[in-house]
Image (cartoon, rainbow, N blue to C red):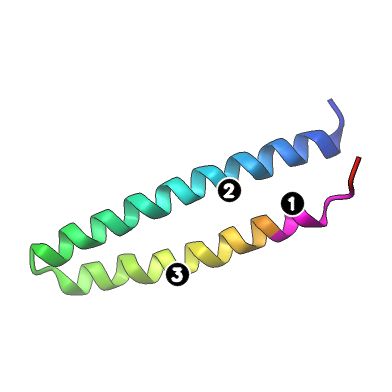
Amino acid sequence: METLEKARIRLKHWISHSDHHESEYALFAEDLERAGLDAAAAQIRHMIELNAGCNDCLRKALAALPEE
């Protein structure tokens, strides 16, 4: 398997995996807020924002790959 094909597979997998975790993080932040743990929830929400930036980089890397 060529490097380009491997890169596409990995990037798509990482994007999907990261998106899934992001939704789990949001649910966890909601649980923390319901429990009155607002400071902890705020940190999780901040992490979600940082993770979104990472996902953006992964999407840009995928888009930067040349067409076959």
Left or right? Give the position of 23 relative to 42: right
The answer to whether residue 4 is left or right of residue 62 is right
Residue 32 lies in quadrant: bottom left
At 43% across and 46% down in the image, what residue appears? 20
Specify the amino acid type for callout 3.
Glu
Label 1, on which residue? Answer: 62
Please state which amino acid type lies under the numbered disc 1.
Leu
**What residue is shown with label 2?**
15
Would you place residue 5 above or below residue 45 in this image? above
Q: Going 32% across and 65% down the picture, which residue do you hit?
A: 44
Question: Which residue is denoted by mark 3 in the rendering?
Answer: 49
Tag 2's secondary structure?
helix
Pick the quarter of the image with the N terminus: top right
Task: Say what amino acid the circle numbered 2 marks.
Answer: Ile
N-terminal of the two: label 1 or label 3? 3
Q: Residue drawn at (41%, 64%), measured in percent from left and top?
A: 48
